[in-house]
Amino acid sequence: MSSDCIFCKIAGGQLETELVYEDSEIVAFKDINPQAPVHLLIIPRRHVPSLLDLQEDDADLAGRLLLTANRLARTFKIDQSGYRVLTNCGKDAGQAVSHLHLHLLGGRPLLQTMG
């Protein structure tokens, strides 16, 4: 856990937010600046700065993050219409918080960016 990381503080219960999912390794909550009707952030409790920092022994965690996105898509009823899962890696890609996080977006047609 990083003491100056806002997502570590959320995962550790030091900052109050409405959690929509949590288990021993993962926390999910609503984005404070939503870009779609459903815009959730899914994070590991453990501080991992970005996708680039995942190691081979993090393969299970990476898989659980994606499976959590699927579970939440069903929970928020965007599984049938379609949804987007993305992560930004580094400043030039738009990563604003240096803690690995997946964005789950849906609830309306999303602009096509890549095929």
Image (cartoon, rainbow, N blue to C red):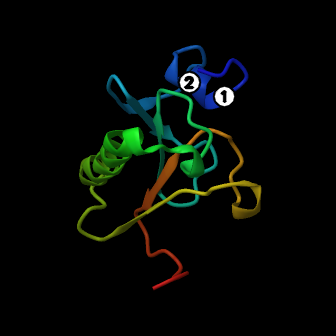
Tell me if 67 is positioned left or right of 57 in this view: left
Snapshot quadrant of residue 79: bottom left
Q: Residue at x 48, y 38 (%)?
A: 43
Q: Residues within 10 Å of mark 2 (few under 14, many from 20)?
A: some
Position of 113 relative to 62 (above/below) = below
Residue 38 x %, y %: 44, 54
Name the mark on residue 98: none
Residue 80 x %, y %: 23, 67
Labelled pair 2, 1 in contact (Cβ < 8 Å): yes
Give the amino acid type for the residue marked by disc 2 in the picture. Answer: Ile
Give the total number of marks visible in the rendering: 2
Is residue 43 something that shows in the picture? Answer: yes
Residue picked out by circle 1: 6
Tell me if 58 is positioned left or right of 74 in this view: right
The secondary structure type at the circle numbered 1 is helix
Give the amino acid type for the residue marked by disc 1 in the picture. Answer: Ile
Tell me if 20 is positioned left or right of 10 in this view: left
Residue picked out by circle 2: 10
Q: Residue at x 62, y 39 (%)?
A: 49
Residue 48 x %, y %: 56, 36
The secondary structure type at the circle numbered 2 is helix
Q: Residue at x 31, y 61 (%)?
A: 78
